Amino acid sequence: MNSRLFWKSLAVQAVAVLLLFGVLVALPLPDDFFEDFGFVVGPLAWLACSAVTARVLQLPLAVALFAAVAGGVAGAIVLVVASHWAGMVAALLVFGASCAGYDPAAEEAPTG
């Protein structure tokens, strides 16, 4: 596990999510928009932010999307048990840990 990649991916994903959250809150949406459509908008936003993280950190998109799904599942479980913000923290931690498991050397073709 690459601890530096853990912190970098966690930080980039967190900033991307916070920026997108700020944009969504600033939009003139109906008051009940997130209550009615949050179950769709949230996961799509999370996946979009993971694509941004992949781009910024030059990770394969598949790695970032896998990390997003893993983090999303963990976050959803914590959300049900605790709260939205606790779920977000769990999702970010699992996202970072999943990205940190990526080893670019494992993708190199064997020379033999």
Image (cartoon, rainbow, N blue to C red):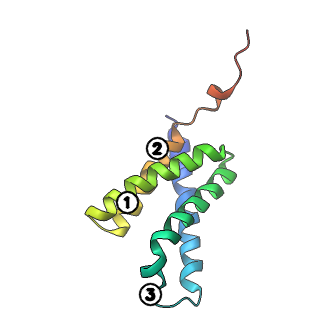
Which residue is identified by label 2?
A: 97
| Viewer-nearest residue: 2 or 36 | 36
SS for callout 1: helix
Number of other residues with Cα within 10 Å of mark 2, as a class: few under 14, some 14 to 19, many 20 or more: many
SS for callout 3: loop
Number of other residues with Cα within 10 Å of mark 1, as a class: few under 14, some 14 to 19, many 20 or more: some
CB atoms at circles 1 and 2 under 8 Å apart? no
Image vertical order of residue 18 relative to residue 57, above or below: below
The location of residue 21, given as percent across then percent down, is 53, 74
In the shown orientation, is residue 36 left or right of residue 2? left
Question: Quarter of the image containing the C terminus?
Answer: top right
| Viewer-nearest residue: 64 or 22 | 64
Q: Residue flagged by tag 3: what amino acid is it? A: Asp
Image vertical order of residue 22 relative to residue 68, above or below: below
Considering only order in the chain, which callout, 2 or 1, is on the residue closer to the N terminus?
Answer: 1
Considering only order in the chain, which callout, 3 or 2, is on the residue closer to the N terminus?
Answer: 3
In the shown orientation, is residue 109 left or right of residue 63? right
Image vertical order of residue 71 relative to residue 29, above or below: above
- Residue at 42 percent across and 80 percent down: it is 35
Label 1 and label 3: CA atoms lie apart by 21 Å
Residue located farthest toward the left when viewing the structure as drawn: 81
Q: How many marks?
A: 3
Which residue is identified by label 3?
A: 32
CB atoms at circles 2 and 3 under 8 Å apart? no
Which residue is identified by label 1?
A: 76
Q: Residue flagged by tag 2: what amino acid is it? A: Ala
The location of residue 81, given as percent across then percent down, is 26, 62
Image vertical order of residue 104 relative to residue 18, above or below: above
Q: Residue flagged by tag 1: what amino acid is it? A: Ala
- Residue at 45 percent across and 56 percent down: it is 72
- Residue at 45 percent across and 52 percent down: it is 71
SS for callout 2: helix
